[in-house]
Image: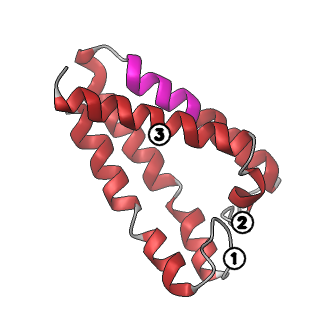
């Protein structure tokens, strides 16, 4: 197995795990990241995004080779789409996931770029 395949499968597992956490033990924590302008209930938003993460993670693992680059772009787009939630957590100073200072919440914002790069590089 190539390093890229290990990275892609790891990304898929990461997404599946994150999705499961949305639906179970970290559900309340994720609600702190839902921006006020989202027109759904915070819990509904967390549940729907968790389901999407599980589906994306599974697809990242099982997508045939000729479609992986497209899948990587979809996952990168998802990571970009959830960035407003991280911005809302920072802007509104909402504590969750142990992020209880402005510096910690700001550092979390910087993690989206590596996640996007992971999605693109592991599927290219």
Q: CB of mark 1 within 8 Å of CB of mark 2?
A: yes
First in sequence, mark 1 or 2: give its number.
Answer: 2
**Dot 2 corresponds to which residue?**
32
- 5 lies above or below 82: above
Tell me which corner region of the image, top left, top right, bottom left or bottom right, holds residue 50.
top right
The residue depicted at 30 percent of the width and 46 percent of the height is 118
Mark nearer the viewer, 2 or 3: 3
The circle on residue 94 is 1
Q: CB of mark 3 within 8 Å of CB of mark 1?
A: no
Mainly helix, strand or loop, the magenta region? helix
Q: How many marks?
A: 3
First in sequence, mark 2 or 3: give its number.
Answer: 3
The residue depicted at 69 percent of the width and 57 percent of the height is 30
- 49 lies above or below 36: above
**Distance in Å between CA atoms under marks 1 and 2:** 6 Å
Tell me which corner region of the image, top left, top right, bottom left or bottom right, holds residue 5.
top left
Residue 62 in view: yes
Identify the secondary structure beneath mark 2.
Answer: loop
**Distance in Å between CA atoms under marks 3 and 1:** 24 Å
Identify the secondary structure beneath mark 1.
Answer: loop
Assess whether residue 16 is covered by the magenta stretch. no
**Direction from residue 106 to residue 38 in the image, left or right:** right
The residue depicted at 69 percent of the width and 76 percent of the height is 94
Percent coordinates x, y for residue 72 in the rendering: 32, 35
The circle on residue 119 is none
Identify the secondary structure beneath mark 3.
Answer: helix
Percent coordinates x, y for residue 45 in the rendering: 73, 48
- 82 lies above or below 1: below
**Dot 3 corresponds to which residue?**
14
Quadrant in the picture for the N terminus: top left
The residue at the far bottom in this view is 102
Where does the magenta region start and end? 53-62
């Amino acid at each position: 197995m190539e390093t890229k395949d290990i990275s892609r499968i790891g990304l898929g597992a990461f997404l599946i795990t994150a999705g499961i956490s949305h639906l179970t033990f970290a559900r309340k924590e994720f609600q702190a990241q839902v921006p006020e302008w989202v027109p759904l209930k915070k819990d509904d938003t967390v549940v729907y995004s968790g389901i999407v993460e599980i589906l994306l993670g599974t697809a990242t693992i099982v997508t045939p080779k000729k479609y992986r680059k497209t899948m990587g772009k979809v996952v990168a787009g998802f990571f970009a789409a959830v960035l407003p939630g991280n911005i809302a957590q920072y802007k509104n100073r909402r504590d969750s996931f142990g992020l209880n200072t402005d510096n910690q919440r700001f550092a979390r914002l910087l993690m989206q770029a590596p996640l996007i790069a992971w999605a693109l590089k592991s599927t290219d």
